[in-house]
Amino acid sequence: MSEQKPTTLVLPGYLGSGPGHWQTRWEALDPAFVRVQMPDWEHPSRDAWCRTLAAALDATLDAFDAPVTFAAHSLGCLTTAFWASRYASAAQLAKVAGALLVAVPDPAEAQFPQDATGFAPVPLTRLPFATIVVASSDDPYGGVPFSRTCANAWGSRWIGIGARGHINAESGLGDWDEGRDWLASLAAVR
């Protein structure tokens, strides 16, 4: 395995991540952060998003001999869980060092996007790579109990960061160095 820094696939949620979002800022700070371009940000389909993630991972693995990490937000977290549990090959899973799963949304919440299809029920099986679930105490898309349930089922470390809304651009995180440190800790585990 190469000693080069792992590539991080950035997995935004519904509608993507705008210019002030921590994911977009991370991409601007470091070319090793590469956004997965979903086929339809306004009408997410679990099947299409998981297949797009698989193709992006294959393209990344063809280009780099290094482990890959995921920086997922919102619906990107559910995409990661579904991909790992139902779509991924053993060869793909072997190359994933870990995933930072931020603001996991609950499909049962009233705020969950009506245009998102196939994201329920959420797979509640252990994920085959290291994960950290980061949650806010006042996230309108997914409460603390739901994020803890997911973290426990997935074998994730759970981190609560207080009242930060949906942990997006409106949360005032800036470059969110703490989140990058958590992501780096996942790569170091490998």
Image (cartoon, grey):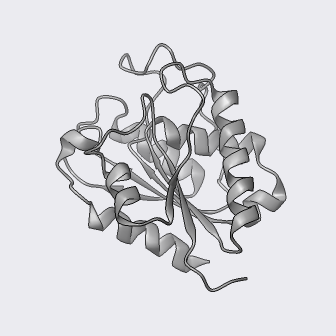
Q: Is residue 164 shown above or below 155? A: above
Query: Going 66% across and 74% down the picture, which residue do you hit?
Result: 66
Q: Is residue 16 shown above or below 189? A: above
The image quarter containing residue 5 is bottom right
Q: Is residue 45 shown above or below 18? A: above
- Place of residue 183 in the rendered image (x, y in percent of width and height, measured from the top left): 44, 66
Query: Going 67% across and 39% down the picture, which residue do you hit?
Result: 52
Q: Is residue 164 visible?
A: no
* Front-lying residue, 26 or 95: 26
Query: Going 45% across and 36% down the picture, which residue do you hit?
Result: 13
* Front-lying residue, 90 or 39: 39
- Place of residue 140 in the rendered image (x, y in percent of width and height, measured from the top left): 29, 29
Farthest bottom residue in view: 3
Q: Is residue 77 visible?
A: yes
The image quarter containing residue 122 is top right
Q: Is residue 93 left or right of residue 39?
A: right
- Place of residue 83 in the rendered image (x, y in percent of width and height, measured from the top left): 68, 43
Q: Is residue 142 left or right of residue 71?
A: left
Query: Going 36% across and 50% down the picture, which residue do you hit?
Result: 24
Q: Is residue 178 shown above or below 108? A: below
Q: How many numbered marks are there? A: 0
